[in-house]
Amino acid sequence: MDWQAEDWQVFGVLLAIAAAAWVILMGAAFGAVRLFFWLDDRNKRMKLERRRIASRERQQRRREKRQAELAVLFAAGLKPQDGNVQVFTGESYLTERRGAGVYRQSKATPKFKTLKKLKYGGVDLATARELAQPLAAQLAHTYRKSRWKVDIVVCVPSSAERLKERGFNQSELLARMFSRLAWIPYRDVLTRRFEVEQAQAALRTAKERAANLEGIFAAQGVAGLRVLIVDDVSTTGTTLNECAKALRQGGAVEVYGLTLFSGVSRKPRR
């Protein structure tokens, strides 16, 4: 069969049309695949977001239930006991506080001895940082288990006398190292308004300790934030509560307390 020039022209046009159709078809197929993966990714993100919302709602319900239980205990004149979690039994400004260990049960542990050396061993700043690293890691581990959501980390301000004696604030060292491990920004927003004449450790009761620290702390730049206070030891919870009070007065919406060791409330008298 002899093809004329016109036949070859028609054949070329048909071939070009077929090639164009193939390109369009392949483009449509590629677009459909991309659309499928985009929709699948969006559905996964939506499911994850729904799970996060549900998780936050469950945490809020548990928190409200816990607060209702505490209100019943307070009305009955009892002190709550909940393992390492302890709420100040006066007028509490803390949302919740938690300790990595129980104070009375941890005095013989290596962690407690490390903290004792950090506070009272007369070490220099470089050594203090080395001692604080494993302690900050323990705080980070305890924080992850708590499932709290906070915006900034602060420390308990040290007295001028203690700061001069040690050359550093061990609570600030722990808070700064913890903030790097937990990826939460550290802010120096708590200050002491005045110095107390008597050390907290010399006072026996929570009532005396609360009166000793009344109005000592001030806070600024925390309006609308969820704040985590980091300290080394909390026995009665008075110092943490007074810090939380200042933060609340500064506009903080939630205040949590995290310490290496915390006291445990005694059983109520019958």
Image (spheres, rainbow, N blue to C red):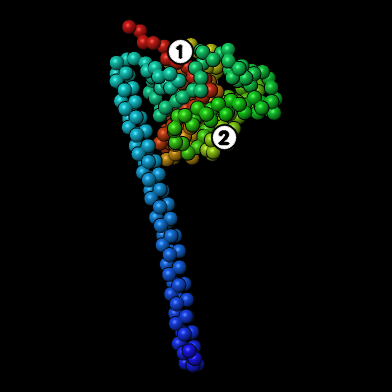
Residue in the picture at 69% in, 22% down? 123
Using the image, tell me which numbered label, if any, was put on residue 205. Answer: 1
Residue with the mark numbered 2: 181
State whether residue 251 is above or below residue 86.
Answer: below
Q: Nearer the viewer, residue 89 or 5?
A: 5
For the residues labelled 1 and 2, the Cα–Cα distance comes to 35 Å
Which residue occupies the foreground of this view, 20 or 235?
20
Q: Position of residue 161 (x, y in %)?
A: 62, 22
Q: Is residue 64 left or right of residue 164?
A: left
**Name of the residue lying farthest toward the front:** 1
Q: Secondary structure at mark 2?
A: helix
Q: Is residue 261 above or below residue 42?
A: above
**Residue shown at the point (41%, 48%) measured from the top left:** 45
- Residue 195 falls left or right of residue 127: left
| Residue 15 higher or lower than 151, as above or below | below
Q: Residues within 10 Å of mark 1 (few under 14, many from 20)?
A: few
Which amino acid lies under the numbered mark 1 shown in the image of this protein?
Answer: Thr
Disc 1 versus disc 2: nearer the observer: 2
Residue lying at 41% horizontally and 22% vertically, measured from the top left = 87
| Residue 137 in sight here | yes
- Tell me residue 125's x, y (percent): 68, 27
